[in-house]
Image (cartoon, rainbow, N blue to C red):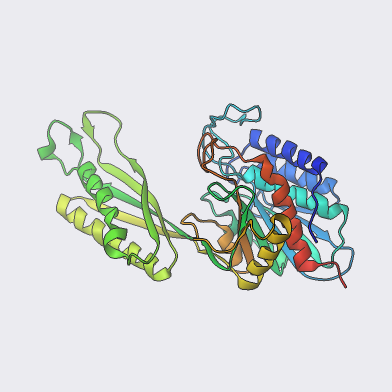
Amino acid sequence: MTPRIDAGAVARMRAWRHYLHANPELAYREHDTADFVAARLAEFGIGVERGLAGTGVVGTLHGRRGPGRRIGLRAELDALPIREKTGLPHASTRDGIMHACGHDGHMAMLLGAAEHLARDPDFAGSVVFIFQPAEENEGGAVRMVQEGLFERHPVDAIYAVHNWPGLEHGAIAVKPGPMMARFDTFEFTVTGQGGHAAMPQNLRDPVAAASALVGALNTVISRNIDPFEQAVVSTTILSAGEVHNVVSDTVRVAGSVRSFEEEVQALIERRMAEIAAGIGAAHDVAIDLSYKRRFSVTENSPREAELAQEAARAVVGAAATKTAFRPSMGSEDFSEMLKVRPGAFAWIGAGGPAPNGGLHQAGYDFDDGLLGIGAAYFVAVVMQETGPAA
């Protein structure tokens, strides 16, 4: 069965998406966003639970054909601390906050699927619509799981999608195994003896040590990791001092690590600590490392990935269903849900290079042309999982 999302439904999704884009909220502060989502679900006649992970919203719809599989569908509520530069009529009204990753589109697609299924729940089993807070950095999926998401809503499988610039427009990519990498964070505190910039002989300069540290971190992958393995170390924060003529006592150096294998992850952590110790000794400064393992590999289970491929074929056809591709070095906290329930994460192609900017950029805007595709894909997954009963 090929789901049909009509023009009226697409128009409603577009309006929802534009409202959400204009009113973004940061992690665990998505109060207005959660109110909006909960109100739409209630309008569709879907039972709503609030409060998991603070601002989470969970809706449950039962099929008219009686008991069957319970299927979870997930979207994200939060935006990013970026000042929008699109100039669009629906641009963010909240300075310094924008939906620069497409979570507004993902919410609209899931609401569209919820509306469609609620209008004609011709399936056996139940669908659980999960609107998760704090996907960006804060690990809202972890918190939802810890607070009993799957005890309160014991789904048999769970699915999610993400728009994907660089993938053929409207294509859906999904396969068994890894889709996205592990995500770790590191933070070094370099402590020395600062002072007058004109008298470096009297200092133990943490800035010089931090500069050497950043350069050395770039060799962790190239000189320690097998070239056939995949890993990334990126320094994203380097901060020290406030004036031109004073060397600070401390420097902060922080960033992220991506990998797919636990052995590679452990080697990177060990080498970073060893390099820091050596540079600290060479520069006569103290370098402390805080290394945190944040999210696991986003890894699709075989049965659910194959089912997702069938759903994709029903919506976009075989040619636009991509089943052979390289996983991304990006990461997703949906991985933490996949650790405790089987499921599949898919990408929906936004084309590219995107003229309005890629993900996490101030010029980015979700492509409304994907709304109907995403909603139809969610519906197709549900119908593949639950079917109409024979």
Identify the image quadrant of residue 10: top right
Q: Quadrant of the C terminus?
A: bottom right
Q: Position of residue 44 (x, y in %)?
A: 84, 48
Image-based side of 241 in relation to 306, left or right:
left
Image-based side of 109 in relation to 8, left or right:
left
Q: Position of residue 21 (x, y in %)?
A: 64, 36
Q: Quadrant of the N terminus?
A: bottom right
Image-based side of 194 in relation to 307, left or right:
left
Identify the image quadrant of residue 260: bottom left
Write the residue at 72% across / 56% down: 315
Q: Position of residue 100 (x, y in %)?
A: 56, 40
Q: Identify whether 345 is placed above or below 283.
A: below
Of residue 354 and residue 358, the one placed in the foreground of this image is: 354
Q: Position of residue 225 (x, y in %)?
A: 32, 65
Image-based side of 242 in relation to 118, left or right:
left
Write the residue at 81% across / 49% down: 115
Identify the image quadrant of residue 305: bottom right
Q: Is residue 23 visible?
A: no
Q: Identify whether 284 is placed above or below 1.
A: above
Residue located farthest toward the front when viewing the structure as drawn: 319
Write the residue at 25% across / 41% down: 249
Q: Is residue 203 visible?
A: yes
Of residue 92 and residue 3, the one placed in the foreground of this image is: 3
Of residue 14 and residue 68, the one placed in the foreground of this image is: 14
